[in-house]
Image (tube, rainbow, N blue to C red):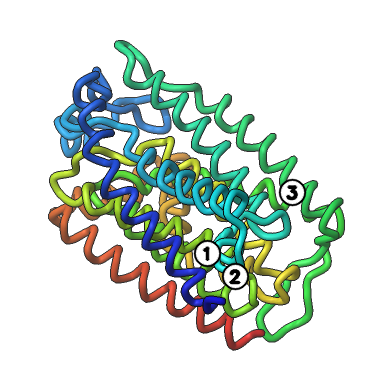
Amino acid sequence: MISDVIRVLMPAGLAFGVGIACTPILAYYLYKYKAWKKTPGKLAMDGSEASVFNALHTKHEIRAPRFGGVVVWGSVAIVTAALASIAALAPSPITEQLDFLSRSQTWVPLAAFFVGAVIGFVDDLYIVTPGGSGLRLRYRLILVALLSLATGWWFYDKLDVVSINIPLGDPVYLGILIVPFFVALSLALFASGVIDGIDGLSGGVFASIFASYAIIAFSQDQVDLAALCAAIVGALLAFVWFNIPPARFYMSDTGTMALTLAIPPIAFLTDSLGEGVGVAVLPIIGALLVATVASNVLQVVWKVVFKRKLFRIAPLHHHFEAIGWPPEKVVMRYWILSIVFAFMGVIIALVAR
């Protein structure tokens, strides 16, 4: 028999090791086939040229390949499949304990994780083709909405989730409205994927978020879910190892979509099902994701109402670049804040149990 701590930490270590070992091979083929955007530059949300962004990042867009997210979900897939296969082929108390693939805790978040990875991978393929601009936003929104609708219905119909727990308060009953709430949450998190905009930024922020939920799930005795979150953290750290400036590659949509779509089911599993407050603390743990989406929304509203921009450029991390912060300073400060908010969220979650 092995302790639950080892059951959680071993997948993290294995995912980190797999990611470090496989990245040179992946990078070789990404550079060989020139898997980067062929035409630099972006458009603003109103369709005009994003002049400030293009001045800051035009060269970076064609300097390194996309598809770095393959390191994250590929490492998790290899570790998950390997531990499950070993448990099936050589069953023993140890191998069965290390297998964290379980219907009650990890099937749903893993499904969302890999479906998001596939959608993002297809989008990246379209982006790196000559003249390509990726899947249209409305198609991605439709796919995300359909996936989250099915997942939200699963929580409502199969798992009887009808309320959201509030720290030190009574649960908020939503009934069937839990389904559109889940869809709205998933779409908001999908929108936060634009935080993948500076070398090293997104990997560190997402690692803090998933590490937080690993601790929360572990405190609820959901060891399989904690192991999955830890494996994602290990894979993210392997990605960050190669993504620090100058980045070997970018996470891009195949990574951000996988990660952002896995967060809602994990948050729900650590809420009423785990007798915790996993959903209520998400805005705290993911505060930088909230800030990213909020800055985009405020920028649009400000331009419509006041006919001028609130920020030099949105989302917020690019605004800091535009006012003169070096990219490394933005990244380091975001990492610090992500750890601080993660601690705050975890403390609230543990106290509220």
Question: For residue 24, what is the image quadrant?
Answer: top left
Name the disc covering residue 152, or none. 3
Q: How far apart are marks 1 and 3 (CA)?
A: 23 Å
Question: Counting residues from the N terminus, which is met first, the one under dot 1 or under dot 3?
Answer: 3
Q: Name the residue under label 1.
A: 227
**Residue closer to the observer: 22 or 185:** 22
Residue shown at the point (29%, 70%) measured from the top left: 336
Image depth: mark 1 or mark 3 in front = 1
**Residue closer to the observer: 184 or 342:** 342
Q: Tell me the SS state at disc 2.
A: helix
Callout 1 crowding tier (Cα within 10 Å): few <14, some 14–19, many ≥20: many
Question: Counting residues from the N terminus, which is met first, the one under dot 2 or under dot 3?
Answer: 3
Amino acid on which the number 3 mark rests in the picture: Gly
Residue shown at the point (74%, 48%) measured from the top left: 152
Image depth: mark 2 or mark 3 in front = 2
Q: Name the residue under label 2.
A: 223
Q: Distance between the residues labelled 2 and 1?
A: 6 Å
In the picture, the quarter occupied by the C terminus is: bottom right
Q: How far apart are marks 2 and 3 (CA)?
A: 23 Å
Mark 2 and mark 3 residues within 8 Å of each other at the beta carbon? no
Q: Tell me the SS state at disc 3.
A: helix
Q: Is residue 306 visible?
A: no
Q: Position of residue 43 (x, y in %)?
A: 34, 27
Residue shown at the point (41%, 62%) measured from the top left: 12
Q: Where is residue 251 in the image (x, y as percent from the top left)?
A: 34, 41
Question: For residue 211, what is the image quadrant?
Answer: bottom left
Callout 3 crowding tier (Cα within 10 Å): few <14, some 14–19, many ≥20: many
